[in-house]
Image (spheres, helix red, strand yellow):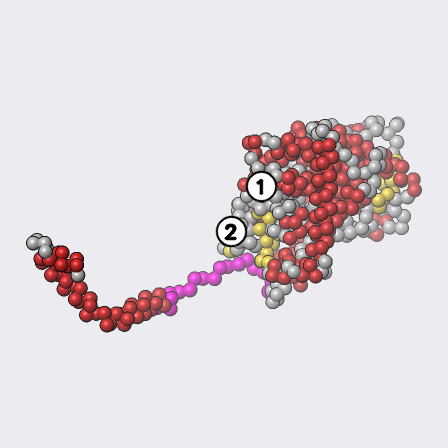
């Protein structure tokens, strides 16, 4: 009112003041009906979206890849019982196709079972599928996913892989560790020669000890076995336990809302104890290196501790990340190489023509030398084909390490939701008759033309995966396997123990972190004289 009075006192605002006063009076007249007007407005605001919803067509449902019907709560877990996972998934993919959707409890999963679909996932859409499934055991043992094998795809992983590839897996670094490999293979040969006179030798155990010794010397400069022997050590027991807890799912992985069951079953306590043992061992390795003054400048520990002080890397190499990387070295350096050697010797024992051809090549090239060195490997062409064919039939990881879809995406016409686990059945892809002639036969000659390699470019041969998560240490593993196999064929003649014969020789697989034999590889070794 004071405003109106002031405006009325202005000579040129009389008409405007009267008009404003009229609007005020009109508004005052409407005040009794204001609740009704507000209610009507609110009703209309709600009515129009509702009418639009009724008249609009619902969005088409997202098309998932085909897959078997699931049961309540357990999903498709029941269809994987009684078989090794890669074999069960192959059976299901025969019915539902090379891109299959299923549920592992509450976890949606995508199974890839053809070279064409593998190329879509590992190359075309690699950025969507380059993360890892956060399995409880892997998260715990990797210090919260700061390693290379199980980390999510983020800036930390990219920097870590780049660093390790250049500083630990480079050609010069691999060459610098050559004496370690040659010395330890020499110890293995001597151990076999001593033990062979008393009966069959357990090559599975010896291969495990061999690669533990090689890896530990590369990591810290120390052997795992006692000096001069390729024998069991406390490190072996720890790595076997790691393989067990990492080799499968826990209840909490497939039923996240029931993770508390891990405590009731005792699995969580076992995992916690394993982690404490791992952490204690790694801390001791680092402490001993520091106490020695870091004299082994070429070891992985020395390299990582030196890089930790590099200001250009910032806070990347924390203590936990260093330990997680070292554990990757131990786990990846022994299990997969051991498994490959087990299967290479097993296949040669059951394929005498291939054995004869490989052995004659090695002895012809090496001659009367006491041992095979890494220079000789360049001329052992058939031996390299034997290793490649072994990887084809017996990949170290039949389903690779499970991946996880980072965000919603499409493969062809099919929708894949974020957080879906992804399994690439490379075991079946490398036995698929569409890709290979006589796929179940051990035929190293199939690789003679050199047109297919195992480094991720050819999706019919993927023992180490492909794309951003391909195994960075495969060249190091290849050298160790080839050097060991060449020396075994050069120094010994081999026989299956009495009473077994070729048909009774066990070729079964075991469910573990790596694709091992279901029983130890026991063979009779007879020393072959290198003197004419």
Q: Measured from the top left, where is residue 258 in percent x and y?
A: 63, 62
- Which residue is tagged 1? 157
Is 16 located above or below residue 175 in the figure? Answer: below
Query: What is the distance, in whole Å, between disc 2 and disc 1 at their CAs?
Result: 18 Å
Q: Tell me which label, 2 or 1, sits earlier in the chain.
A: 1
Q: Is residue 299 left or right of residue 528?
A: left
58 part of magenta stretch: yes
Specify start and end residues of the magenta stretch as a single range. Answer: 51-69
Pick whichever, 53 or 223, lies toward us. 223
Which residue is located at x 29 percent, y 68 percent? 38
Q: Secondary structure at mark 2?
A: loop
Pick whichever, 362 or 31, lies toward us. 31
Which mark identifies residue 301?
Answer: none
287 part of magenta stretch: no
Quarter of the image for the C terminus: give it.
Answer: top right
Q: Measured from the top left, where is residue 294 in percent x and y?
A: 70, 29
Pick whichever, 163 or 191, lies toward us. 163
Q: Residue furthest left?
A: 11
Q: Residue furthest right?
A: 198
- Which residue is tagged 2? 407
Magenta span: predominant SS is: loop
Q: Measured from the top left, where is residue 358 in percent x and y?
A: 78, 37
Residue 329 lies in quadrant = top right
């Amino acid at each position: 009112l004071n405003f109106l009075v002031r405006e009325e006192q202005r000579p040129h605002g009389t008409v405007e003041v009267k008009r404003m006063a009229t609007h005020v009076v009109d508004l005052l007249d409407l005040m009794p009906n204001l609740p009704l007007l507000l209610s009507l407005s609110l009703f209309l605001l709600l009515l129009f979206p509702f009418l639009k919803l009724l008249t609009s067509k619902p969005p088409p449902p997202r098309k998932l890849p085909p897959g078997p019907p699931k049961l309540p709560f357990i999903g498709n877990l029941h269809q994987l019982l009684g078989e090794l996972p890669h074999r069960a998934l192959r059976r299901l993919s025969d019915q539902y196709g090379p891109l299959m959707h299923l549920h592992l409890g509450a976890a949606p999963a995508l199974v890839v079972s053809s070279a064409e679909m593998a190329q879509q996932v590992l190359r075309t859409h690699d950025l969507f599928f380059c993360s890892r499934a956060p399995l409880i055991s892997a998260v715990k043992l990797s210090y919260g996913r700061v390693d290379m094998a199980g980390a999510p795809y983020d800036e930390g992983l990219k920097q870590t892989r780049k660093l390790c590839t250049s500083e630990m897996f480079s050609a010069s670094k691999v060459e610098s560790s050559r004496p370690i490999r040659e010395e330890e293979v020499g110890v293995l040969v001597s151990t076999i020669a001593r033990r062979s006179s008393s009966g069959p030798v357990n090559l599975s155990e010896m291969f495990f000890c061999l690669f533990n010794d090689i890896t530990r010397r590369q990591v810290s400069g120390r052997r795992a076995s006692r000096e001069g022997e390729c024998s069991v050590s406390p490190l072996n027991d720890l790595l076997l336990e790691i393989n067990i807890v990492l080799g499968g799912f826990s209840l909490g992985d497939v039923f996240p809302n029931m993770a508390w069951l891990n405590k009731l079953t005792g699995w969580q306590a076992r995992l916690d104890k394993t982690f404490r043992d791992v952490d204690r061992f790694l801390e001791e390795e680092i402490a001993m290196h520091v106490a020695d003054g870091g004299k082994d400048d070429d070891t992985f520990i020395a390299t990582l501790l030196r890089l930790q002080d590099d200001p250009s890397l910032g806070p990347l190499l924390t203590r936990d990340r260093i330990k997680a990387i070292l554990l990757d070295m131990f786990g990846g350096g022994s299990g997969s190489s051991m498994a490959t050697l087990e299967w290479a010797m097993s296949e040669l024992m059951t394929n005498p023509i291939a054995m004869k051809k490989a052995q004659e090549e090695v002895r012809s090239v090496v001659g009367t030398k006491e041992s095979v060195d890494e220079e000789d490997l360049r001329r052992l062409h058939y031996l390299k084909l034997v290793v490649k064919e072994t990887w084809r039939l017996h990949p170290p990881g039949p389903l690779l390490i499970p991946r996880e879809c980072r965000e919603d995406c499409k493969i062809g016409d099919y929708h894949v939701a974020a957080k879906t686990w992804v399994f690439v059945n490379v075991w079946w892809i490398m036995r698929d008759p569409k890709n290979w002639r006589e796929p179940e036969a051990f035929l190293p000659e199939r690789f003679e033309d050199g047109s297919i390699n195992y480094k991720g470019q050819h999706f019919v041969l993927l023992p180490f995966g492909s794309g951003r998560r391909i195994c960075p240490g495969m060249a190091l593993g290849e050298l160790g396997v080839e050097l060991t196999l060449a020396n075994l064929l050069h120094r010994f003649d081999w026989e299956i123990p009495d009473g077994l014969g070729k048909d009774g020789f066990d070729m079964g697989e075991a469910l573990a972190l790596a694709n091992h034999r279901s029983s130890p590889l026991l063979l009779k070794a007879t020393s072959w004289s290198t003197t004419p």
